[in-house]
Amino acid sequence: MSYERPQFFHVMQYARAADRDVVDMVSGNPDWEPPAALRAGLREYADADPDDFQYPPSEGLLELREEIAARRGVDADRVVVTNGTGEANYLAMAAALDRDAGSEVLLADPVYPYYPGKADLFDAEATLVPAERDGSLDPERFREAASEETSLILVNTPNNPTGAVYSRETLRELADVAAEVDATLVVDEVYDHFDFTGEFESALTLDSDRVVVTTGYSKSMAITGFRVGYVILPEHLVDTAKTRHMLVNVATSRPPQVAVLNALRETDADYYADVRAMLRERVGTFTDALDAAGAEYARPDGGFYVLARFDDFPGTMANAKRLIDEAGVAGMPGETFGSARDEWLRFALVTPRVEEAATRLADYFG
Ligand SMILES: Cc1ncc(COP(=O)(O)O)c(C=O)c1O
């Protein structure tokens, strides 16, 4: 088996070692405050009874699973609390592949690189299906690519890196394609709170036993270091996922589950709306600069990434390094997200220095 280490770390290390000031637009770490109730829950936990410092139930604290289930309108038995969305995706892929319904995984191109990386872990074959120029997906392309070897279709909305938000109709058609070849549709919704269109609908609304939804609190609560996420599986897949989760992890750490539960209960919608408003402003600042730089880009409908294409500056690793050295801005090379956007660079808007980065890019390319 061979699998590669994702390239994020390589670019971040290069940027850190540069002998000039660099605005980091590589990492997906939110730079804003988590909900106040999250800090409060964590503080309170420090004084909890020693019993509360022992193993939690493997599939997650019951109260947290019930809270999630009530919010998502599903039975709590279908919820497994995981070490972030990353593990949720791993469990979802494993459950789909464990059905022995084929060893091919269909992924959209551009692709979040951890998906093909995980497919490699399972010795599955990843087939990339190109997204449209605006980032939307044409389910017909998936239908053409699907075969009896396809066991899994995995997509992410709001999307990293394109910023596209897929319509419910698109998701429904993808679920239909999955049904036609006896596959499972997994939808990673980790950016679900960052929808600027107001039209995002979870794939859970399809109410299909072909559909698995993964998400987490890394981004929505600005806590990528806490590692709390969850997967909602149809009944026929949930037991294998719980077993795998138990054998690999024993359980997800208890203190962050308690803090997340407190934050879920005590945080009102304004917290999320304020973050969205801030991100929307950053998108405006950044895309104005891209206009000034003469770049091509698709304005994100969700998430917090912008893909941009500059003339005669393809999205290679060499050019990402050149941009660090010559412009003082670190972005991800598009070539690390498959082949569909290898002319592009991806910039993460999770830095208070978006304006500065925008000015630097406009000066460099303008
Ligand atoms: C599409 C996508 N899925 C999953 C993850 C990982 O999320 P988590 O920190 O919840 O594991 C990320 C992180 O950037 C992501 O962009």
Image: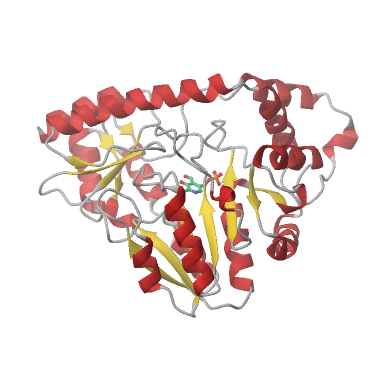
Which residue is rendered at x = 48% and y = 56% of the image?
A: 172
Side of 132 relative to 27 (left or right): left
Residue under the point 36% across and 42% down: 163
- Could you say which is closer to the camera, residue 251 or residue 292? 292
Q: Is residue 353 visible?
A: no
Q: Position of residue 48 (x, y in %)?
A: 84, 27
How far across and how far down the image is residue 139, in percent? 38, 62
**Residue 45 visible somewhere in the drawing:** yes
Across and down, in percent, residue 153 comes to: 48, 64
In the picture, the quarter occupied by the C terminus is top left
Image quadrant assignment for residue 247: bottom right
* 166 versus 359 height, above or below: below
Residue 176 shown left or right of residue 362 in the figure: right
Kindly identify the residue that appears in the image at 40 percent across and 70 percent down. 143
Which residue is found at the position 42% from the left and 54% from the top?
Answer: 170
Taking the image as shown, residue 253 lies to the left or right of residue 105, namely right
